[in-house]
Image: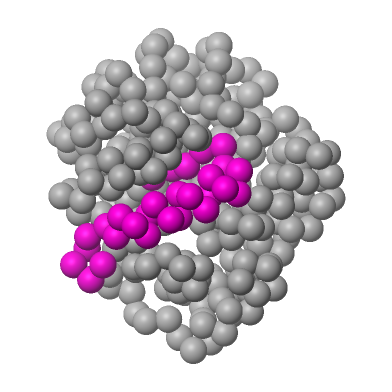
Amino acid sequence: MLKEGFFTALGTPLDDQGRIIIESLKKQIEDQIAAGAAGLFLFGTMGMGGCVKNSEYEGGLIAAVEAVDHRCALLVSASENSLAKVTEKLAVCEDKDIAGVVMTAPYYFKSGDPVVVNFLKKTAAMTKQDFYLYDHEPITKHKLNMGMLRELADAENFKGLKTFDLVFAKQSIANPVKEGFTTIFSGSDLFDLAYPYGIRRYMDGIFACMPKSIAKVQKAFAGGDNDGAKKVLGDMMGFRDQMHANSIWVCFSYAMNMLGYAGNFAPDYELPVSDRGREVVKAGLAGLGEI
């Protein structure tokens, strides 16, 4: 079972040819582990999983495995939009020393629950790695539910769920579909409500540019200081909202660069960060004590 604590969805640093900058990725991993991360998530939404070239997928995964070196859990997205494409990614993951693969429902095509369950059952059967679902309706246009989890429970390697839906997270913990089932909550604005309830594993990609701050949050939670955690989380989410207002991707990328992580962390078609965005990022990182 995954350790309790925070999980960071890593940013993926790319050069102008779309190649992963390995040393930048490794530095990010070192800083997150130093901050106390219980786990890391590679090639997720904030890691531009849908933008990373197929030719870079294995190299980035190998580098991350080496950098983590068993010091925390490493989860890897294998999400794709067809069984044929999923097969390729799972084949790369199969012999790697990771904590598990993460799969969303198929995106682009809108399908009913039985079709989504069929897709997920088949993908789970393709790998011996532990298998986690990512309930990500804004991207996939499919909402997972407890009935779907129960249909997947017979898969021996089906180990858990990542969801931003607090009600779904509570349901999956109160009535787990199998022994040892693990839920990771990703509803950033509700972490301070979820943690006292007993949801002790939480994830966000924004943690990648706020390692000192999320370390403070986890220390407060672990010490029973929910008000302290709430205060820092409020400041973090306020900064995130300001980045959203000035184009989240390029602001996030600029923030990562300011922290010493080389590369582009935004889709390669994004416009440059604005002067206002630069000001927001500098002020936000300084205010949080990140720089």
Q: Quadrant of residue 225?
A: top right
Give x and y (percent) for residue 126: 24, 22
Residue closer to the observer: 65 or 162: 65
Q: Is residue 25 magenta?
A: yes
Give x and y (percent) for residue 114: 34, 25
Q: What residue sits 76% from the left and 38% below the top?
A: 222
Give x and y (percent) for residue 51: 27, 57
Residue range highlighted in magenta: 15-42
Residue closer to the observer: 110 or 82: 82
Q: How is the image coloured?
A: one colour
Marks counted in the figure total: 0
Residue 171's place in the image compared with 36, above or below, is above
Left or right, residue 140 beside residue 3: left
Residue 170's place in the image compared with 263, above or below, is above
**Quadrant where the image shows the C terminus:** bottom right
Give x and y (percent) for residue 15: 26, 67
Residue closer to the observer: 266 or 61: 61
Left or right, residue 50 beside residue 224: left
Q: Is residue 49 magenta?
A: no
Which residue in the rendered view is the most extreme toward the bottom? 275
Q: Quadrant of residue 181?
A: top right
Q: What residue sits 51% from the left and 82% below the top?
A: 278
Q: Is residue 17 visible?
A: yes
Q: What residue sits 59% from the left and 25% below the top?
A: 172
Left or right, residue 116 beside residue 58: right
Q: Is residue 83 visible?
A: no
Q: What residue sits 35% from the left and 43% below the top?
A: 64
